Image (spheres, rainbow, N blue to C red):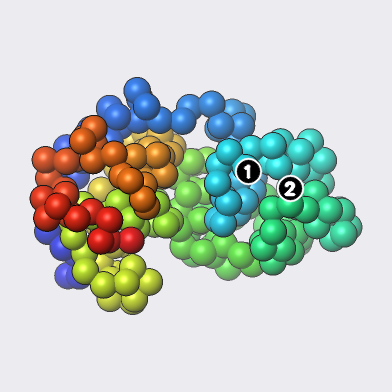
């Protein structure tokens, strides 16, 4: 982890603060949390890539009603899949979802290949962060995520300079994400780190005064957290 900035806290302390905040303030009633399966987590993660949680929920519930299993999705006509995606936009997501379901049926016995991040990334439309989210939330195994919300919060906590999409910056953020990811409560931690960026360390008007990390946040210490994307 040569590229990793000095962590703002030891990993266990970071996890404790984040999960304590999540237990009180996090989102615990999202439809993909119960029942939780690799398929349901996967669909939710793809829907959430460009869309807010509140918008996704009714679409997710309708999609699951029509395609309750990976097999149901794989065997459906693409037009039907796209119809149930109408309103979410970014239709390449739906096409990749459909194609990935077909590949899983043909090559993985009708299951998502959650053996590793790499096996999931071999499917259309699944990147490293999405693969990590699927594994962490559906199997409870250790896997890091780095979606836009997590990038923003880690960038601010450590005052990481530069555009987060730049390879060197992204390597630093991945190193931090992996360092902080625990070995227990993976589903909760993964939801917590997403919720923290989405509801507290927001892009505009972050709630720094009630943040559980405001005593160690380097961007807050500089007085300009919104300087960091």
Query: Where's the C terminus, which quadrant?
Result: bottom left
What residue appears at the point 40 percent right and 30 percent down from the top-left corner? Answer: 26
Q: Does residue 27 appear left or right of residue 166 in this picture?
A: right
Work out whether residue 65 can be spotted: yes
Label 2 CA crowd tier, 10 Å (few <14, some 14–19, many 20+): many
Residue tagged by mark 2?
A: 70
Work out whether residue 175 can be spotted: no
Residue 97 horizontal/vertical position (percent) = 69, 58
What residue appears at the point 64 percent right and 37 percent down from the top-left corner? Answer: 57
Residue 183 horizontal/vertical position (percent) = 31, 41
What residue appears at the point 25 percent right and 66 percent down from the top-left corner? Answer: 172
Q: Secondary structure at mark 2?
A: helix
Q: Does residue 202 appear left or right of residue 94 in this picture?
A: left
Q: Does residue 10 appear left or right of residue 135 in this picture?
A: left
Q: Does residue 136 appear left or right of residue 178 in this picture?
A: right
In which image quadrant can residue 75 be found?
bottom right
Residue 3 horizontal/vertical position (percent) = 20, 70
- Is 49 or 42 nearer to us in this picture? 49
N-term-proximal mark, 2 vs 1:
1
In the picture as drawn, the residue positioned furthest to the top comes out as 24
Residue tagged by mark 1?
A: 56
Q: Nearer the viewer, mark 2 or mark 1?
A: 1
């Amino acid at each position: 982890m040569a590229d990793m900035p000095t962590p703002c806290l030891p990993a266990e302390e970071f996890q404790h603060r984040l999960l304590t905040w999540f237990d009180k303030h996090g989102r615990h009633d999202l439809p993909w949390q119960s029942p939780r399966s690799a398929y349901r987590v996967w669909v939710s993660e793809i829907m959430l890539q460009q869309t807010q949680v509140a918008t996704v929920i009714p679409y997710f519930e309708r999609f699951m009603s029509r395609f309750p299993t990976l097999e149901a999705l794989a065997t459906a006509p693409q037009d039907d899949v796209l119809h149930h995606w109408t309103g979410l936009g970014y239709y390449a997501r739906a096409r990749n979802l459909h194609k990935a379901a077909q590949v899983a049926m043909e090559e993985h016995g009708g299951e998502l290949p959650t053996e590793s991040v790499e096996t999931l990334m071999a499917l259309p439309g699944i990147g490293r962060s999405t693969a990590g989210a699927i594994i962490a939330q559906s199997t409870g195994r250790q896997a890091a995520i780095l979606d836009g919300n997590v990038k923003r919060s880690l960038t601010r906590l450590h005052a990481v300079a530069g555009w987060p999409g730049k390879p060197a910056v992204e390597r630093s953020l991945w190193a931090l994400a992996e360092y902080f990811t625990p070995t227990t409560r993976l589903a909760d931690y993964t939801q917590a780190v997403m919720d923290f960026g989405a509801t507290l360390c927001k892009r505009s008007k972050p709630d720094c005064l009630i943040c559980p990390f405001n005593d160690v946040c380097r961007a807050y210490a500089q007085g300009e957290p919104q300087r960091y994307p």
